[in-house]
Image: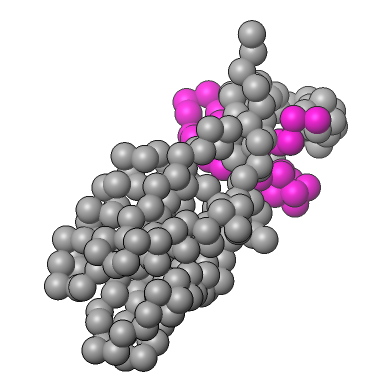
Amino acid sequence: MPEPTPRPYLTIRRGGSHEIEIKKSRFICHLARVGDEDAAQAFITGIRKEYWDARHNCTAFVVGDEQRRERSSDDGEPGGTAGVPMLEVLRRRGLTDTVAVVTRYFGGIKLGAGGLVRAYGSAVSEAVDEIGLVERRPVALLAVTAGHTRAGRVENDLRAAGYAVSDLAYQADGVRIEVGVPEPEVPAFHAWLAEATAGTAVAVDAGRTFVEVPV
């Protein structure tokens, strides 16, 4: 049976950190894009080593598409006051392949259970807002081959027509240009390419990839 076509999914635009302060406690949220649970755990380990002097490094992550895997940790905070509200933010935003670590430097004023839930949730929510989101959309990957003298024009035409050029490789017999095309549009793409290049460039199937669209 053929593999099912991947679905679009949301994730963060990039990795980064964002800090908030609540009653003299510092909450630093570190976000990263990860491909699997091992990568998420490696990121968490790295943050805990870097911020070894913090009172807490609480964590949450979601990875995968069809079968999502979720984990969270309160790292010494009262049960359910840190990791769970962090995870709830990721769930509510519909994110996957995303890990969050919130580093807390205690400011001397206790926040209570409700205050901790709000603080950890806000730290992740504000970090996500600051960094931004993308939708990763699956597309067919086509390899367009053009002669050296025409490759620059073909690339410009592809970009001008709105196609996502992902890679260029200069070879002895020409230039290979990888292009992402939504699968329903592949037949129209072949027709467009033949007309735009007067039949001098050809495209072959090269698998699948994702394009990222800011949301």
Q: Judge from the rendering whether residue 104 lies leftward or rightward of residue 125; answer left or right.
A: left
Q: Position of residue 56 (x, y in %)?
A: 25, 68
| Residue appearing at x 59%, y 24% in the figure | 207
| Residue appearing at x 45%, y 62% in the figure | 86
The quadrant holding residue 107 is bottom left
Q: Judge from the rendering whether residue 177 lies leftward or rightward of residue 34; answer left or right.
A: right
Q: Is 200 placed above or below 118 here?
A: above
Q: Position of residue 153 (x, y in %)?
A: 68, 44
- Given residues 90 and 17, the one toward you in this image is 90
Q: Is residue 178 magenta?
A: yes
| Residue appearing at x 65%, y 22% in the figure | 4
Q: Position of residue 149 (x, y in %)?
A: 62, 37
Q: Judge from the rendering whether residue 210 lies leftward or rightward of residue 36; answer left or right.
A: right
- Given residues 13 and 97, the one toward you in this image is 97
Q: Which residues are magenta?
A: 155-184
Residue 168 seen from this side: no
Q: Position of residue 19 (x, y in %)?
A: 38, 79
- Given residues 204 and 185, the one toward you in this image is 185
| Residue appearing at x 29%, y 89% in the figure | 109
**Colour approach in the figure:** one colour
Q: Is residue 77 magenta?
A: no
Q: Is 206 placed above or below 211 here?
A: above
